[in-house]
Amino acid sequence: MSATPSASPAASLPSSAAGSPWSPLHNVLFRSLWIATIVSNIGTWMQDVGAGWLMTSLSSSPSLVALVEAADSFPLMLLALPAGALADIVDRRRLLIVIQGYLLVVAGTLGVLTGFEVVTPWVLIGFTFALGVGAALMLPAWAAIIPDLVPADEMPAAVALNSIAINV
């Protein structure tokens, strides 16, 4: 009996695990990205709620409260196509690292300004827009990196797990 190297990480798993919807989580890189997706989304949702809540304490104008959500959503509409092209052109891993660094700096600065109580409605809208730009640039690369992490036979399960992570 000759030993041949397996073609994919899933090939070494028992057949019941390889066909499992959870099998992509056996891949360390995919599992790390999947957990990061969940944590990142929780942080994003906390920031969305916090920004709206902060705006209600800064201004009683319903228009400014609505403008916070618009500032978060508009970059996605504006940058979806260019961000997808950028994710196809450059190294996705490096792009994600740079964008995560950018988001850390922007969110950290907003947090410090909020802690010192120097945030105005327009500063909040500007930082919310800046965070939306980062998210818009990140999402296509984040989604497109999954085929680089799992073998083709696990792709449907990986996509399903990624959808679960986004909607948890």
Image: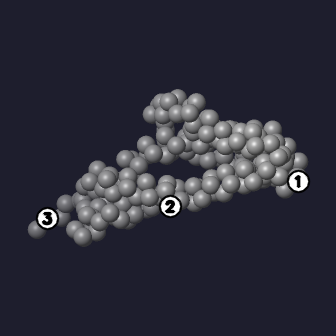
Q: Residue 122: which quarter of the image?
A: top right
Q: Nearer the viewer, mark 2 or mark 1?
A: 2
Q: Is residue 149 shown left or right of residue 57?
A: left
Q: Which residue is under mark 1?
A: 116
Residue 141: image location, x then y, percent: 49, 41
* Disc 2 target residue: 168
Closer to the chain start, of discs 3 and 2, is: 3
Pinpoint residue 74: horizontal percent, then vertical percent: 62, 35
Query: On the image, which quarter does residue 106 sit in?
Result: top right
Q: Is residue 85 left or right of residue 5?
A: right
The nearer-to-camera label among 1 and 3 is 1
Residue 129 at what x, y percent from top left? 69, 38
- In whole angstroms, how far apart are the C-alphas of marks 3 and 2? 45 Å
At 40% from the left edge and 58% from the top edge, which residue is drawn? 161
Question: Badge 2, how many Cα within 10 Å: few under 14, some, many 20+?
Answer: few
Q: Which residue is mark 3?
A: 2
- Mark 1 or mark 3: which comes first in sequence? 3
